[in-house]
Image (spheres, rainbow, N blue to C red):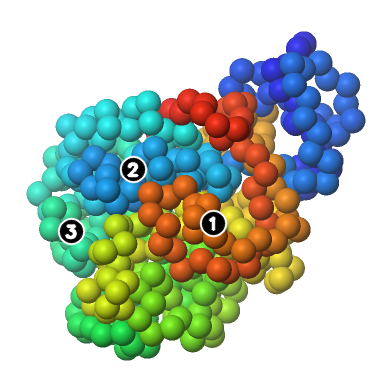
Amino acid sequence: MRHDLVVRSRRAVLPDGTRPAAVAVTGPRIAAIEDYGASLEADRDVDLGELALLPGLVDSHVHVNEPGRTEWEGFATATQAAAAGGVTTICDMPLNSLPPTTTVAALEEKRAAAAGKCWVDVAFWGGAVPGNEASLRPLHEAGVVGFKCFLLDSGVPEFPPLDVAGLRSALGSLAAVDALLIAHAEDAAEIKPASGRDFGAFVASRPPIAERRAIENVISAAAATGARAHIVHLSAADCVAMIAGAKAAGVRLTVETCPHYLYFAAEQVPDGATEFKSCPPIRDSVNREALWRGLEAGVIDCVVSDHSPCPPELKALSSGDFGAAWGGIASLQLGLSAVWTVARRRGRTLDDMARWMASAPAALAGLPAKGRLTVDGDADLVAFDPDETYVVDPARLRHRHPVTPYAGQTLTGRVRQTWLRGIPLLEGEGGTPVGQLLKRG
Ligand SMILES: [Zn+2]
């Protein structure tokens, strides 16, 4: 048979390991995976040689903010940044857009805002907030990949947090349809106000115990209800053992961490450098090492960006006041390189990268066609040079705003080309956004 595309690589990162292979694509899907030198008929035959062929990454934690706060980040800019960074599927968070995605009507508004603008595929999280329990099942049936909740103030008034009773009640409702709840786990009772330019004081204001107390509540509620729960953006590594224990006890719990917690350490952050502000915060290098060990041990399931930009003026860059600055780090385009830069030094492989940043987040979000190079899966492919180094130039980022703590960092590993369902993305000038709006399953 004649294929539309064949991509050959001596380092194809397949589910059962990395080896030379030829990936044959017909229409939107992978039709066959053959030997590197296999004779295959195709309209286009691309030989990557020693460049690695990765599955397109799945970033299950992206704040697009459109509609309503499109000046923070929008579908067109976020998805171009994703494509440039080797991410072929994003899952959009339900808050910071207006309206938040807490009803089916709001989901329809979001989908209408995204239609025709997306350069990669986009799936959507719903939100669980006080008073919207009746909307959870309809949102689930409308195809959201799960539900996000906060356990403390979210930073935007239209997305209030659940209290402990509300958390348990939401998990009970979601257990009935086997839907996933993902939680921003920090406990406000353990957090102190912080202001000023001192990064150490900001970190101290959000101590590990704040994460621990909130995660305890999530574990208890998941254990009591049998529901599936997921901890977003784990920063406090001393929660890893508790999470491992809950998993071992059969609690249906998963956890993610983010590139900035694995790459940066608090000791390196200059005072007043509010581009480094996230909640929970980047902690010290001892914590970073322990997070890596939690990831390498398989307790932490995935690494996703928590890309959460805002306009530069909301980052309080001129005052450098950590109290005033928006807490969010923009890294959608850089996550693969940032994590690989450290991972390769630690002797980790591209197989680990594909698991942490593609197959595990795809499984989390219930997107079986995504995140793996496998026959009948979507032909989402990334040509990646694992040896090339580059200095991050914010002017080359496709995020709406170039503010990023990675500016000037030397990263290893560069995306050379990305294909979405067999279609090459961002080739030359122009092109059209071919991303689709996905539903779970
Ligand atoms: Zn987030």
> Is 158 positioned to the left or the right of 10 in the image?
left
What is the quadrant of the C terminus in the image? top left
Name which of mark 1 and mark 2 comes first in the sequence. Answer: 2
> 179 or 264: nearer the eye?
264
User: Which type of secondary structure does the marked residue at label 1 adopt?
Assistant: loop
Name which of mark 3 and mark 2 comes first in the sequence. Answer: 2
Q: Nearer the viewer, mark 3 or mark 2?
A: 2
Look at the image and tell me whether residue 431 can be seen: yes
The percent position of residue 115, horizontal first and vertical second, equals: 34, 27
What kind of residue is marked 1? Leu
The percent position of residue 273, horizontal first and vertical second, equals: 39, 77
User: Which type of secondary structure does the marked residue at label 2 adopt?
Assistant: loop
The span from disc 3 to disc 2 (Cα, nearest Å) is 17 Å
User: Which type of secondary structure does the marked residue at label 3 adopt?
Assistant: loop
Circle 3 Cα neighbour tier, 10 Å, few/some/many (<14 / 14–19 / ≥20): few
User: Circle 1 is placed at which residue position?
Assistant: 334
> 143 or 223: nearer the eye?
143
> Is 247 positioned to the left or the right of 106 in the image?
right
For residue 202, the mark is: none
The answer to whether the residue labelled 1 contacts the one labelled 2, judged by CB atoms less than 8 Å apart, is no
User: Circle 3 is placed at which residue position?
Assistant: 156
The percent position of residue 154, horizontal first and vertical second, equals: 22, 62
Q: Is mark 3 within 8 Å of ligand 1?
A: no
The span from disc 3 to disc 1 (Cα, nearest Å) is 26 Å
For residue 74, the mark is: 2
- Residue shown at the point (47%, 34%) measured from the top left: 119
- Residue 219 falls in image quadrant: bottom left
